[in-house]
Each structure stands twice: as structure tokens, then as C-alpha cells.
Amino acid sequence: MKFEITYLGVQAALPHRGGITTSQVVNIHEDLYLLDCGEGTQMKLEQWHVRRNRIKAVLISHLHGDHVFGLPGLVTSFSHFQRTLPLVIIGPPGIREFLCTSLRISEAYIGFSLDIRELSHDGTLCVYEDKNVSVCAFPLHHRVRTYGYRLNEQVVLNVNRQKIEEYQLTPDQIREVRQKIDVNVKSGQKVPWTEIVSPKHLPRSYAFCTDTAYFPDVVGSVGGVDVLYHEATYLSDMQLQAVERFHSTAAEAGRIAAAAGVAQLVLGHMSSRYFQHLPFLEEAGMYASNVMIASEGLVLAIPQKKTYQILH
């Protein structure tokens, strides 16, 4: 069962050196979830052979153009691929007006339904769920309202046959515990579903944090994830600019990863003023043990044994 991330675009602010701005696809059990949609996302979907009709939900962090200007084009493009399945689009207040105005003015034809959900909460909240994933959104600290996302894998549950016999469970009760519902057994005892079932493997998780100033509040939202993508727009030599522009340095990203106990930190959204990325690894590596740089076309797989494999 796949859980892998394809990085389509990692540039900050504007397309640069042939690369596009923020966009990435998470593949969970062959269903796809798009994180941000910078201009040029369609081209990269084609280049990296991503089957766009498998995209079930689009998660937008904020409404700055380098994270959302590709969305109207992507949505209208589905009509050329005979899409009929609904598409969920989640983002901060204004995402509905931005997209629907673009579609209305351009007289776009959409042959499927759009489920647009606007976020306005504080704290961490589950905003999407299907058989493969549950998605939580949490606030970041940027110039405009911005959200990060955590994608938690839904795993198949094994039912303990001995427990079925011990509690004389009926078929309906077995279905309930598979749905994570406690059951009342013949003895009158209420048995927690966790006592009867167990996951086939440990659930995997991925967190996406861009754009944001250093914001320790996110530690609770991303704690223990397998992979954390965190923006690192600047090195520490531009700490003042990072504060003024509500962005993070590589060192600050490393501090968040270390505090959250994440297994792998992936840095992205580096300013185009930097030509060498080794200093980003060195700065973040002062705090976090496993650090890598996101690059276009990188596919990062999270296998079930909690190790990481770069496919290309």
C-alpha cells in the first residue's frame, strides 16, 4: 500500500530556473491529494506522469499567488479528462470567491461537482476524511490566514478471532468494532473496540507547513509524523527579513522538527537568492537528525517499516 509524496514545485515566490512554485501530490493507497497549486502545476503533473483524475482533494495553505494561481486552470482542465467524480477543495476564507469568480468570468465548463470548504478555525481540526486518510488543518503564522495540513493514513484493522469467541460477537458487532465503535457484549460488559482489533501496520503520516514564521505552536499538530515538510525561505544571515516577512529560516525549521520528534524533515520554499542548498542542510541539521531538501520530481516513499526510500 503506497504512501508517497511527489514534489511538483518547491520554489518560493515565483517560478525560477525552470521550476515552479509550491505544489505537491500525496499518494495514499493510489488515491491522490494535492497540496497547494502554484502556476504550472498542470505541466508538472504531465511531466511526472501523475494521473490527475485520481486527485480526490486539493488542500490550499493560503491565498498568496505562488500557492494558488494554478488552481483555476487545473479545475477547468478536468473537463478534458472526462472527470465525473466530485472534487473537494479546502482552504482559508476567500478560496470559494477566488475560484468561483475565475470560473464564472471565464465561462468555464465544469462537468463534476465542487465541494469547497473554507477554514476559519483556531487549533487543530479534522477537515477531510475518506477510507484512506484523515486530514487535520492547523493555523500557521504568516501575513495572511494560513493553514498547515497533517495527513494521517487510515489503516485496515485486523479482528482478533480469540476475542470474537471470548465475547461471542455477532456479525453486526464485528462490523462495529471495524468502524471503531465500542460494543456491548452478552455479559453486559462494554468492550472497547481497541481491545478487539489492531492495525495491520502502524499508520503513516505527513505534515505540510508553508508559509510560516517560526511558530512553536505547530509542534503539537505535527508531533511524531513520519515526514514533515517545512518551509525554509532563508538562512540565519537573513533572520531579520524572515521575521519581517513572516517566513522561517532553515535553523528554525530544524528546531520545529526536533521539538516535534519527527522522523524526517524535508526543507523547501528556499529563496531564489540562494544558489547552494548545502548550508540549509547544515543549519537545520544543527537541531534535526534527518534532513533533506525537496526538489522537483522527487518522490519520497514512506514504507510501512518506518524507513524512507527516494524513488527518483
Image (spheres, rainbow, N blue to C red):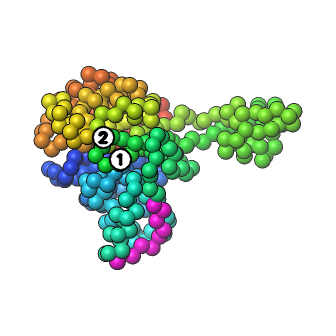
Judging from the image, what secondary structure is the residue with disc 2 in? loop
When asked about the image quadrant of residue 190, the answer is: top right
When asked about the image quadrant of residue 250, the answer is: top left
Label 1 sits on residue:
146
Q: Are marks 1 and 2 in contact (CB under 8 Å)?
A: yes
Residue 95 left/right relative to 174: left
Give the camera-side residue of 239 and 84: 239
Give the camera-side residue of 145 and 34: 145
Q: Residue at x 39, y 53 (%)?
A: 92
Amino acid type at mark 2? Thr
Per the rendering, the mark at residue 212 is 2
Query: How far is disc 1 from disc 2 in space, using C-alphas?
Result: 8 Å
Residue 122 left/right relative to 230: right
Per the rendering, the mark at residue 74 is none
Q: Main secondary structure of the magenta part?
A: loop
Amino acid type at mark 1? Thr
- Residue 22 in the magenta stretch? The answer is no
When asked about the image quadrant of residue 249, the answer is: top left
The picture places residue 63, in percent across and down from the top left corner, at 32, 54
Residues in magenta? 107-116
Q: Residue at x 82, y 37 (%)?
A: 185
Q: Residue furthest bottom?
A: 107
Q: Residue at x 36, y 30 (%)?
A: 216
Q: Quadrant of the C terminus?
A: top left
Residue 195 against residue 296 in the figure, above or below? above
Question: How many numbered circles does the render carry?
Answer: 2
Q: Residue furthest right?
A: 187
The picture places residue 244, in percent across and down from the top left corner, at 20, 39
- The answer to whether one can see residue 161 in this image is yes
